Image (spheres, helix red, strand yellow):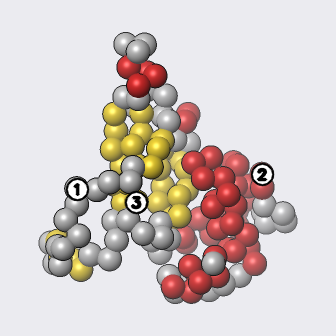
């Protein structure tokens, strides 16, 4: 539930925050600022920006560069891995991870979760090389 996601990340639950998270969840890899703003009911764009920045700073969303170099916001509920085509900017989620989950800390950090973006060339773009 969206409200629990906010509470679990120590973020105050407000109608605007819940609505924006629901939109990000619904849009998936189409959740650019433009698309989020176009789907909110009565939230002005500066508030959308502030809320997205708060979500990012608090580790609730990840910023991924998508098509046309737009920033895409993706909810991080668990470890996430993405592969992005350097040519067409298509983004897909990768379900496997080589990261050792048994590592207790890295550089003195206690690991809570992680995200990873892999850049490559998709099959469609490979055929155009």
Residue at the image point whose x is 60% and y is 53% from the top: 28
**Above or below: residue 37 compared with residue 113:** above
From the top left corner, tell me how far across and down residue 48 is, in percent.
Answer: 68, 63
Mark 3 or 2: in front is: 3
**Above or below: residue 5 compared with residue 89:** below
The earlier-in-sequence mark between 3 and 2 is 2
Whether residue 57 appears in this view of the structure is no
From the top left corner, tell me how far across and down residue 39 is, in percent.
Answer: 78, 55
Q: Is residue 110 left or right of residue 4?
A: left
Mark 2 or 1: in front is: 1
Secondary structure under tag 1 reads loop
From the top left corner, tell me how far across and down residue 111 is, in percent.
Answer: 26, 75
Within 10 Å of disc 3 (Cα), the crowding (few <14, some 14-19, many 20+) is some
Query: Quarter of the image holding residue 113?
Result: bottom left
Secondary structure under tag 3 reads strand
**Residue labelled with disc 2:** 38
Please state, as top left, top right, bottom left or bottom right, where the C terminus lies in the image: top left
The CA distance from mark 3 to mark 2 is 26 Å
**Residue labelled with disc 3:** 80
| Label disc, if present, on residue 19 of the rendered structure | none
Residue at the farthest front position = 96
**Above or below: residue 99 compared with residue 93:** below
Whether residue 16 appears in this view of the structure is yes
Q: Is residue 16 left or right of residue 58?
A: right
| Label disc, if present, on residue 98 of the rendered structure | 1
The CA distance from mark 1 to mark 3 is 12 Å
Within 10 Å of disc 1 (Cα), the crowding (few <14, some 14-19, many 20+) is few
Residue at the image point whose x is 33% and y is 44% from the top: 118
Residue at the farthest right position = 42
């Amino acid at each position: 539930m969206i409200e629990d996601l906010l509470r679990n990340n120590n973020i105050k639950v407000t109608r605007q925050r819940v609505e924006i998270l629901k939109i990000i969840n619904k849009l998936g890899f189409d959740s650019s600022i433009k698309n989020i703003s176009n789907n909110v009911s009565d939230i002005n764009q500066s508030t959308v920006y502030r809320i997205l920045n708060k979500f990012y700073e608090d580790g609730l969303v990840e910023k991924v560069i998508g098509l046309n170099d737009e920033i895409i916001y993706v909810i991080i509920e668990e470890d996430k891995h993405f592969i992005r085509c350097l040519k067409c900017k298509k983004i897909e989620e990768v379900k496997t991870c080589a990261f050792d989950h048994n590592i207790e800390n890295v550089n003195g950090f206690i690991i809570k979760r992680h995200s990873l973006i892999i850049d490559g060339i998709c099959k469609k773009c490979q055929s155009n090389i």
